[in-house]
Amino acid sequence: MDSAERVEYEPVSVKELLAEMKDTAELLIDLSYSAVLLRSNAVAEEVLELESRMDLLQLRARMSLLMAARNPDDAEALAPVLGIVGAAEKISDAAGDIAKVVLEDVGLPEAMRAALPESVETLVRVKIDPDSPLVGDALATSNLETETGVRVIAIRRTGDWLTDPDGETVLRGGDVALLRGPEIGVTGVYEELSGEPYEPLEPPSEPSADLERAMDSVVLMKDVSELAVDLAYGAVLFDDDALAEEVLDLEAEVDALQSRFEAWTLRAAADVDDPVSLRGLVHLAAATEVISDAALEISEGVLRGLDSHPVIHEAVLESDEIIARYAAGEGSRLAGRTLGDVAVKTETGMRVIAVRRNDESRAPTGKEAGWVVSPGSETKLDAGDVLIAKGTRTGAERMVELTE
């Protein structure tokens, strides 16, 4: 922040603050890596704007929680809530550090942009032209997501952010919208909203083998860290010790990946003309590791046997992208088929982030006990398996039809 804004206590809903912090933190992760992918100062500046917003949110949340604690029982109940507030702030700071790699031109291998596309959906910032044919339309009326696969994930309007635009949100001329989706869809929507052609970046040159391994390690760290954050919220929402243990394992995996990254980067430094150009890559890995630490902080209360406060459940359920749990019913479209066979993500827009095997079906099928994290299209499901999925409320309703 250029100048510190004075913040005074005012009665606010902790549930709403937590929901906005969750949405903002997840948006910041997307935006920060997209700024690297696009080499976009504009997107990086949006990250810093949102980081400033997060600073205010966490201060207000802490004030409200301090006012709510009146005795030791209150303090114990609210401790996990404070942990989630602190974790969201850590994610925000990490995203800000990633954005500064772009803004301050710290130095990042050009080939890094080739390593990210499979991990980051195309995300662009577009200023809506007042003459756009979509101005004045609600998002539900325009059917953008249905027809193009492109979702408006946030809108900045007269200095304020709408981090959870819904079907009733109306697009206005002068709005700055953030679009996420497949590149072919983003291209058309960008041109329709801005009145200007979308110009994707040219692919970079191939890196050395050691540098490629280092960059692959960073991308994998990013994927694992984001999964850990999703599972951490799931562990809190469902008060699930096993999910919290998975978060602990994922955090340890990120630590191991960082060690490998450091080794590959040091070896790659001997092959590049200017080793200082790798400094941004080191910053990127360090910030990514902080995100995995934040995930562990979210689930720490569950790991330590503390009951999740009801306000956490309500906040997660009211956030932009919700996390839901389903059981594959006997005779449902999922039972006995793979996630790819049913095209779950295509049909519902929900992303299955974890599957817990049904105890009764596990023995005859030879499946391992516990959770399968980050299942793929080849993951086969049996009746009674439990799925944790993340997506929109509309997608969550469609998911019910697949599991019943």
Image: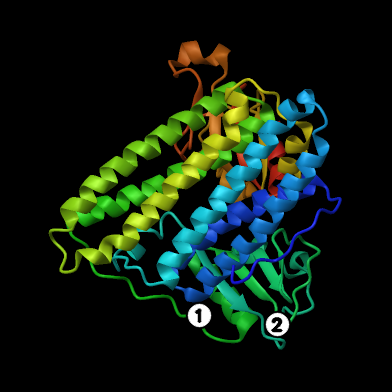
Determine whether label 1 and label 2 are within 8 Å by CB.
Answer: no
Q: Quadrant of the C terminus?
A: top right
Q: Identify the element where label 2 is drawn.
A: loop
Q: Identify the element where label 1 is drawn.
A: loop
The picture places residue 253, in percent across and down from the top left corner, at: 38, 35
Residue beneath the point at 74% across and 35% down? 313
Q: Nearer the viewer, mark 1 or mark 2?
A: 2
| Residue 68 location, quadrant | top right
| Residue 54 location, quadrant | bottom right
Amino acid type for the residue under numbered disc 2: Gly
Do we see residue 340 in this rendering?
A: no
| Residue 92 location, quadrant | bottom right
Q: Quadrant of the N terminus?
A: bottom right
Q: Which mark is residue 174?
A: 2
Amino acid type for the residue under numbered disc 1: Tyr
The picture places residue 374, in percent across and down from the top left corner, at: 48, 37
The picture places residue 179, in percent across and down from the top left corner, at: 59, 67
User: Colour scheme of this structure image?
Assistant: rainbow
The picture places residue 315, in percent across and down from the top left corner, at: 74, 42
In the picture provided, is 220 more to the left or to the right than 346?
left
